[in-house]
Amino acid sequence: EVEAQMVEFAARGLRTLGVAKKGSEAGAQWEMVGLVSLFDPPRHDTGEVIKAANALFVDVKMITGDQQAIAIETCARLGLGTAIMGPEIWRGTSQLGETELSKIVEDVNGFAGVYPEHKYAVVEQLQKNKHVVGMTGDGVNDAPALKKAEVGIAVAGATEAAKGAADIILSEPGLGTIVIAIKRARKTFLRLNFYVVYRIWASAYNYVFFLLLSVALRFRFPSWGIVLVSLLKDIVILATSKDKVPVADKPQAWNMFRPTVVALVISLISVLGSVLFTFAALPQYGNWWSTFSMAPLSQPQVVMALFLQLVQSYCLTVLITRTKGFFLSYERRPSLWLAVPSIGMPVVFTFFAVYLPRTTLGSGPPAVGCGWGAAGVTWAYSILVLLVAESAKLISYYILEFEGNLRARREMARRKMQREIAADLLRDGGLKSLMDEHRPTNDVDEATRENERLELLSQIEGLKAHVDRLENDLSGVASLKAGMLQYIRGQLSAEDFATLLSTPSPSKPHAE
């Protein structure tokens, strides 16, 4: 009865404390007085934190020493999923292979009835499965797992042992700080990732374009122009530290291959665009200005048109390298700190390229203002190249992240199903309702079992009667056997033996 009551309390998420008393006389035994139910609710913001973490594709699992029924009921209320393993899997852990444990920790939503070494084993196995693991705890029994996890978090009110093993110590009640930390970490990661993309693009574009400019087109660009565009590029790079970066919807892992490929694809488009522009603008090659009803430009004017095109490439390309999506999307708009230099500097230096008087500084050919017509053509051409590079970037990201996005969608579908199961369980009254559903059936089973018991007793009586008949049969066979031996030895006459055979007896059929 006590066990049944404890299970019922546990199904409602309640812990049970037993109360007993013992008499003062010698040899007195403990006597159960009653049970006290204790409610240990989750922290006030746990449900919201779990929901926010799941939206960020962070898989949350419960590891608790509480009873399995308590863990299931609590998880159902938190929308965490109800696939909770009990302590039975840890019995004979040496027989539990690493392959089985590896699959279990991936598939279930939590573990109940565990000890400190089990928490450590779960964290260790998740790490072997190539996961980055964060662990929260407040007690001495959590310290080993907190130390093992990549990010150990001691919650408010934790013991000194837990604080000493943790990487982060929360000073205020609640777990919302964890989600804030996740979002800020992902912003920092994306900001660094986009910086790497732009930096690789700028280096590849800078080296390859000026190499082709000198070797293939035999054109010398003024040294002051190279220094000035490099300075403008560095200003843009500094502004990226203040950029508005979205929170990544999935966990991020450093993979140098992806940003390198994307940066090289964009730089390829940019290099081809600048080389074609230079070829078309130089009077000894394309001299395409007549196509736009303009007078041909001299070589000093082409220098300034090319300088403006380089400024536009260095400043505007940062707008497409700073995001994985379409750069004109409102949700991915840049911050004011980045928008001003990346758009403002090309506008300002447009006036510089239009009105610059004839200038010869350092090595290289002289330069002179190219006029508004050439500046307008340059702007249109740079925007066209930027859109082509943006298309190439989107295609590159789609190909490189296709498999990861597919796994993310599958994981989202799995978690949605778990939440629906948990919601159905909670809507129907929790785990206790499942137990209550079987109670009427149990009453019917009691009556059925009573009928079966009576029927079994009747069968037993019939078997006893049958055994008695068999015993009588065996006694008749024994007397017949004794008579036959007497007849063979001559101790019994033929008439007496015939009389023995003809005597009516229950054993006669068997004797015959």
Image (cartoon, rainbow, N blue to C red):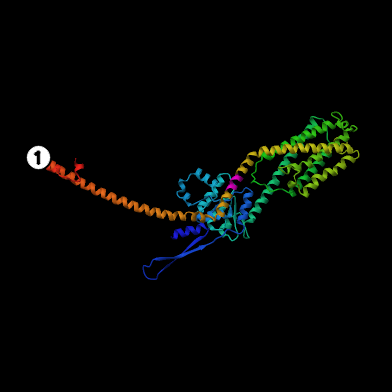
Q: Is residue 412 magenta?
A: yes
Rendered residue at 63%/39% (across/down): 403
In the image, 306 versus 87, the foreground residue is 87
Task: Name the quadrant of the C terminus.
Answer: top left
Residue 446 coordinates in the image, percent (x, y): 41, 55
| Above-or-below relation of 51 to 369 | below
Residue 101 coordinates in the image, percent (x, y): 51, 46
Rendered residue at 19%/47% (across/down): 475
The secondary element bearing badge 1 is classed as helix
In the image, 3 versus 46, the foreground residue is 3
Quadrant assignment, res 229: top right
Residue 332 visible in the current orientation = yes
In the image, 223 versus 233, the foreground residue is 233
Task: Name the quadrant of the N terminus.
Answer: bottom left
The amino acid type of the residue labelled 1 equals Ala
**Image position of 281 (left or right of 44):** right
Residue 210 visible in the current orientation = no
Within 10 angstroms of label 1, few (less than 14), some, or many (20 or more) residues?
few
In the image, 192 versus 252, the foreground residue is 252
Residue bounds of the magenta highlight: 411-417
Q: Write down the residue under mark 1.
A: 494
Q: Is residue 378 magenta?
A: no
Q: How many marks?
A: 1
**Image position of 236 (left or right of 92):** right
Quadrant assignment, res 265: top right
Q: Main secondary structure of the magenta part?
A: helix
Residue 365 coordinates in the image, percent (x, y): 87, 34
Residue 376 coordinates in the image, percent (x, y): 86, 38
